[in-house]
Amino acid sequence: MKNRSLVLVTVDCLRADHVGFQGYSRPVTPFLDSLARESVVFSEAIVAGVPTYFSFPAILASRYPLTLGRDILGIAPNEPTIATAMHGAGFATAAFLAGNPYLSPRFGYHVGFDAFHDFLGSLPGASALPVPDENKSLSDINRRIQRASRRTHLTAAAYDELYFRYCQWRSARENLSVDTLRRYPAADVMVDQACSWLRSVGDQRFFLWVHLMDPHYPHYPPQEALAALDVSHITSRRARWLNSFWNRDDIGPRRQQRYREEILSLYDAGVYWVDRQMSRLVGLLQELRRWDETVFVLTADHGEEFVEHGGRYHSPVTLYEELIHVPLLVRAPELSDTIAQSPFSLIHLAPTLLNAVGAEVPGSFQGRSCWEQIAAGGNWEGPPAIVESVGTGRNPLRLEERMRPRQMAIRDREYKLIVNFGERTDRLYDLRNDAEERSPLPAGASVRERARLLEVARAHLEKTRQNRNADFALRARIRDLQQAAK
């Protein structure tokens, strides 16, 4: 492992059931499917938190997201991560992140990287949002009509529908391209930057982290990706209408279901574009003759809901499989194709990857490495995966939103328990017979399994209380206060 390097690719909102190497029938990941045949695939990879700001402390710092307190977001100052460990071991380090505001220096994610580019300064303006630019008098009239419409449900629904159609009529006249409408840099832009950096490091060992946003809402994939999936009839104008409709809060799941397939086509095209760029990235590593000494990892921070349980996007209020079950592919020269079928929490990813490249694992990491097991051709057998989050509202940057009640899921191979601390309820699902989590088991059913998973939750909370790092928590609070004072 003298010259071993690491590439970590994280894809925002990528569900496990939307990649071919985990059984998806649509051909959205042909390159990654071929790569999976020489990799270890963790078929039951589970995030440690939802959404991004609760997921990444586990991915990079092997720390459960609420360990430092519900009021803390991001990586604490001086908290060890994969990046700081590898930088300290002499690796060249770089991160290219496609404009996710929760992965910025504000939350400590830049520490340990020689080159850190979050692309937040390159985000488009309001052109991605279909809101008409009204003059003041028209805006005043509209506000009066809106207030008057709230007198009954029928008039409110009529106003919302008419205003939506008016906004779409106004925006359709602009006929903007998908490149103009796209809110985040596309995967090809990120891979271009990553390739330029890889060419500059020479023979030095490296750690490269690339975070891609292509499957994230709003969905504006390149027309080339839509054509590859035989959905080129979705023009930029149609994509803008679909995204606007999907974002409406005034309609229910029944109306959203009418356009779900088209939204999924946009989402899948984003996944396809990620796959295309992964082929380019690996191709460059092969060209530079670094591929045979590189550990390549692809995973996601969380999934995405498409009204399976009545919701959209990735709200931390629910912890269903479509949100917490993600793909995880690990490729290294000595690994054979293996499918690890036991639940694998991403809390264990960072120590596993540091072991893979021969770097020291920080003592603060809460997960444990499985590298020796998978390198020897064995299967991963670990404890139940724990997912924790807070049922935040729309703005997690507000402290009061982050202090809402805790949510927790405890997931093993056959059962899953979702605990809502605010409502003081728990729901147990038999994943063997109810994979879509439609019907929680009655309170008197599967008592042993419920008690076992509740005991795992209790032990986790107790361990969190005992091992809480007060120094990290205090430093993070001071940083937040300094940010607020700016």
Image (cartoon, helix red, strand yellow):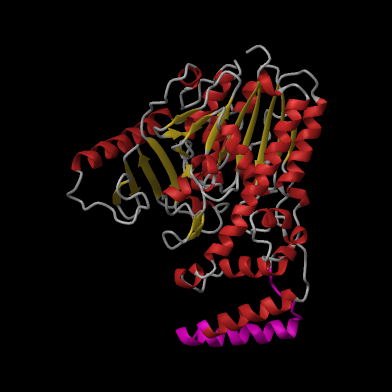
* Residue 142 lies in the magenta-colored region: yes
Establish if 14 lies above or below 183: above
Left or right position of 407 against 275: left
Residue at 81% x, 33% y is: 196
Instruction: Using the rendered image of the protein, determine whether residue 114 is visible from the camera's viewpoint.
Output: no
| Residue reaching furthest to the top | 2
Left or right position of 462 against 286: left
Q: Nearer the viewer, residue 205 or 72?
A: 205
Quarter of the rendering containing residue 39: top right
Residue 248 placement (x, y as % from top left): 56, 70
Residue 450 placement (x, y as % from top left): 24, 42
Residue at 46% x, 50% y is: 322
Bounds of the magenta span? 130-157
Establish if 473 lies above or below 223: above
User: Split into 4 quadrants, where in the image is the N terminus?
Assistant: top right
Q: How many marks?
A: 0
Residue at 27% x, 36% y is: 455
Residue 92 placement (x, y as % from top left): 73, 23
Q: Nearer the viewer, residue 401 or 228?
A: 228
Establish if 2 lies above or below 44: above
Instruction: Using the rendered image of the protein, determine whether residue 348 is visible from the camera's viewpoint.
Output: yes
Residue 452 placement (x, y as % from top left): 25, 36
Quarter of the rendering containing residue 345: top left
* Residue 123 lies in the magenta-colored region: no
